[in-house]
Image: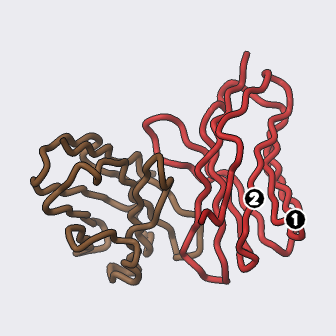
Chain colours: A red, B brown
């Protein structure tokens, strides 16, 4: 059973608009969440993270929102750029000091010029 | 700074052959991870090393899989004998300490015929 779900396999957005990528989780023990970005033929690259003690974290054009009661997080990219076209993976872990990441299967974002 | 380096990038071999995948982690990182990515199961952790010592190999699918880390700058993942169902992309990742964001290599795409 998937503990981290990214229900949209793909998403298309116009350049300059907002991209919203969603992620749901089932394990209430998860307390730290990460987003990774992956280009074809490359490895995933860490993008942004959020601890469960927060509900929002921003880094430039990227903002992650966490709704613990709904077990849902989202990544907002504003404004979207063609270079943002990639597969985005949501990942989660439980416990301070934990190394074990559980990944979603990814959402492919296409930003159309 | 050099990232995580994996070799080979692509490997095609026949069923029954031995396959060895190699990884050089980022210098100074004490945690090393091997992952496998498939369409069906996504990214799965195979094994985790801390300071060159295998800590968690619960994700290694079968005894045909083995991993070593003889020193802080080199790790191998070996499959012997290989089977078609082992075809996947194998990623190596490292982190400064176990709960810091993991940095991934570009992966080895393995095809077993």
Q: Secondary structure at mark 2?
A: strand
Q: Of B50 and A105, which appears nearest the observer?
A: A105
Tell me the crowding category of disc 2: few under 14, some 14 to 19, or many 20 or more residues within 10 angstroms, Cα based.
many
Q: Residue at x 31, y 72 (%)?
A: B72
Q: How many numbered discs sit on the rendered protein?
A: 2
Q: Residue at x 35, y 51 (%)?
A: B5
- Residue at mark 2 to residue at mark 1: CA–CA distance: 8 Å
Q: Quadrant of the C terminus of chain B?
A: top left
Tell me the crowding category of disc 1: few under 14, some 14 to 19, or many 20 or more residues within 10 angstroms, Cα based.
few
- Residue furthest left in the image: B17
Residue A11, given in percent of the width and then of the height, sits at: 72, 32
B67 on left or right of A30: left
Q: Residue at x 15, y 43 (%)?
A: B13
B71 on left or right of B90: left
Q: Against B81, is A109 above or below?
A: above
Residue B29, given in percent of the width and then of the height, sits at: 44, 70
Q: Which residue is mark 2?
A: A24
Q: Residue at x 54, y 74 (%)?
A: A100
Verify CB contact (< 8 Å) between mark 2 and mark 1.
yes
Residue A30, given in percent of the width and then of the height, sits at: 71, 74
Of all chains, the one bearing label 2 is A
Q: Work out whether mark 2 precedes mark 1 in sequence or the reverse, and give the earlier one.
A: 2
A9 on left or right of B109: right
Q: Which residue is mark 1?
A: A70
- Residue furthest top in the image: A113
B60 on left or right of A18: left
Q: Secondary structure at mark 1?
A: loop
Residue B68, given in percent of the width and then of the height, sits at: 24, 73
- Residue furthest front in the image: A1
Q: Are marks 2 and 1 on the same chain?
A: yes
Of all chains, the one bearing label 1 is A
Q: Against B73, is A12 above or below?
A: above
């Amino acid at each position: 059973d998937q503990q981290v779900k990214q229900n949209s396999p793909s998403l298309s957005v116009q350049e300059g608009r907002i991209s919203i990528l969603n992620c749901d989780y089932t394990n209430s023990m998860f307390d730290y969440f990460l987003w990774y970005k992956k280009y074809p033929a490359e490895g995933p690259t860490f993008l942004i993270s959020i601890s469960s003690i927060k509900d929002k974290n921003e880094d430039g054009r990227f903002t992650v929102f966490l709704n613990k009661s709904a077990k849902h997080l989202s990544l907002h990219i504003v404004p979207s750029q063609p270079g943002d076209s990639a597969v985005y993976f949501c990942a989660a872990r439980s416990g301070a000091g934990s190394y074990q990441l559980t990944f979603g299967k990814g959402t492919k974002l296409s930003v159309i010029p | 700074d050099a990232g995580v380096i994996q070799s080979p990038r692509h490997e095609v071999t026949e069923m029954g052959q031995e396959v060895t995948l190699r990884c050089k982690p980022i210098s100074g990182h004490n945690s090393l991870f091997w992952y496998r990515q498939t369409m069906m199961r996504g990214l799965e952790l195979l094994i985790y090393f801390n300071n060159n010592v295998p800590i968690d190999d619960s994700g290694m699918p079968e005894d045909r899989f083995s991993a070593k880390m003889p020193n802080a700058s080199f790790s191998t993942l070996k499959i012997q004998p290989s089977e078609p169902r082992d075809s996947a992309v194998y990623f190596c990742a490292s982190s400064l300490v176990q709960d810091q964001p993991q940095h991934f290599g570009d992966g080895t795409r393995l095809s077993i015929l």
